[in-house]
Amino acid sequence: MREKVKKLWKLCFNDNDEFVNMYFNLRYNSEVNVAIESGDEVIATLQMLPYPITFHGNSIPTAYISGACTHPDYRSRGVMRELLSQAFGRMYRNDIAFTTLIPAEPWLFGYYARVGYATAFRYGKRIFHLPTDETDTPARTSSAVTGWCFQTYTNYDEDVYQYLNSKMQERPCCLQHTKTDFYVILADLNLSSGCIFTLSDESGIAALAIVYPDEEASKLYIKELLADTPEAEHSLLTRICQNMHTETLDIIMPPIKDQSSFDLGMIRIIQAKPVLQLYAAAHPEEEMNIDLIDNELSANNGYYYLNKGKCMYSHRRLPGAHEQLTIGQLTEKVFASEQAYMSLMLN
C-alpha cells in the first residue's frame, strides 16, 4: 500500500523526491492512512496526522488531514468526499475531537466547507528591519550585550524542543508540535537549508526562531518566533540579521487584533458532545438550544442544551425554541471568539 500511495502522491503533487522520501519515512504508516482503491490501484488517499490542540485549557486530540489527493482520472466523481466521510468515521471511533487542514488552493476553502470545515486559523505578517545604529536598539538588545548566547541548530536538541513546546502551550487555541513532529520539522529544515536560532542567558533559552530561506525571492522567512520578552526577541532578530547578512526578516506570526490577517487553515468538529461540554464550561453565561445536523457523522445529530456551564444531549426535541445549525456552522460558532493559530510548518 505504501508504494501505491507514494506513486499517487508523486502524480498529484509537485514535490521533489527528497521531500517525498522524508514524508513517507517519517509520517506515513498504515494507521494514519485512508485510501480508496479501484482494482489494484489507489485512486484516492489521505493521511490523518495526530496533533494535539490547546482548547480552553485542555489538550485535545486532533487529526490533521495531509496528502489528500485523487487520481486525475477519478476527479469530480465524489471520490474524495467518500474518502473524507470514511476518515471522519475512523476519527470518531478513535475519540478524535477535531480535524484540521490547510487547503492547498484558495478554492478548496469552499470545497471543505461543504463537508463541515470552518476557517478558524489565520496568521499575520510583519517585517523586521536591522537597526542602522545603536540609537535604534532598545536597552539590553545590542548584539554586544554580554550574557546572551546566540546558537544555531539543525539537529535535535531536547532543550530547544522543550522551550518550543512550553511556549506554544501558552497560546490559548493553538495546534501543537509533538516531539515526533519536531523531528519532521528538523528534517524539512535540512532539506530546505533552514535552521533554528536561539538566544540564551544563564537561565536557559529566552528566544527562538525557526527560519526558512526563500531562494527565489532571496528572503528569509521566520515561520515560528517565540520569546520570553520583547527585548530578547529584538536581540535574537538582530543577531539573525547579522549572522545571515540580511537587513530584513519576514515574520509569520499569530494575527493581532485590528491588523490585517490571512486565512490559513480550517477545523471541523468530529465529536460534538465533548466539544460542546468544554465550550459550555468555558462560557457558563451562555444558554443555547441547538438542533444539530451533521450529514457526514449522523452520531452528532440531535439536540444540545447548554446552560450554566453544562451541556445536555437528547435524541428527542425538548420544549422551547431551537437554533438549527449544521456541523460547519457550529464549528464556526465555537471558534468565532477564539484566537486560533496553527503553524505554517505542518507537513
Image (tube, grey):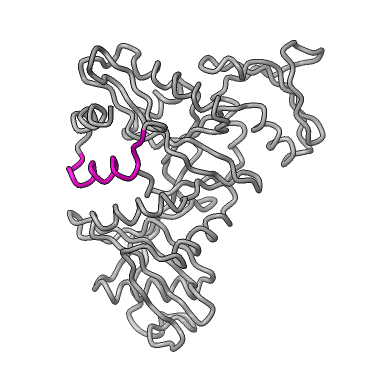
Q: Does the segment drawn in magenta span residue 232?
A: no
Expressed as whole percent of the image width and height from the top left, the position of residue 124 reads: 43, 51
Judged left or right of residue 98, residue 308 is: right
* Image quadrant in which the N terminus is located: top left
Dominant SS of magenta comes to helix
Give the image quarter of residue 102. top left
Expressed as whole percent of the image width and height from the top left, the position of residue 208 reads: 43, 66
Front-lying residue, 83 or 6:
6
Count all numbered tags in the image, as a single digit.
Answer: 0
Q: From what the image shows, is residue 246 above or below residue 262?
A: below
Residue drawn at point x = 49 percent, y = 72 percent: 206
Give the image quarter of residue 292. top right
Expressed as whole percent of the image width and height from the top left, the position of residue 40 reads: 23, 16
Q: Does the segment drawn in magenta span residue 18?
A: yes
Front-lying residue, 180 or 231:
180
Give the image quarter of residue 302. top right
In this picture, which residue range is highlighted in magenta?
Answer: 15-29
Residue drawn at point x = 55 percent, y = 27 percent: 270
Q: From what the image shows, is residue 146 above or below residue 48?
A: below
Expressed as whole percent of the image width and height from the top left, the position of residue 118 reads: 50, 30
Judged left or right of residue 331, residue 151 is: left
Residue drawn at point x = 39 percent, y = 20 percent: 83
Q: From what the image shows, is residue 31 above or below residue 300?
A: below
* Image quadrant in which the C terminus is located: top left
Q: From what the image shows, is residue 3 above or below residue 337?
A: above
Judged left or right of residue 227, residue 316 is: right
Residue drawn at point x = 50 percent, y = 62 percent: 162
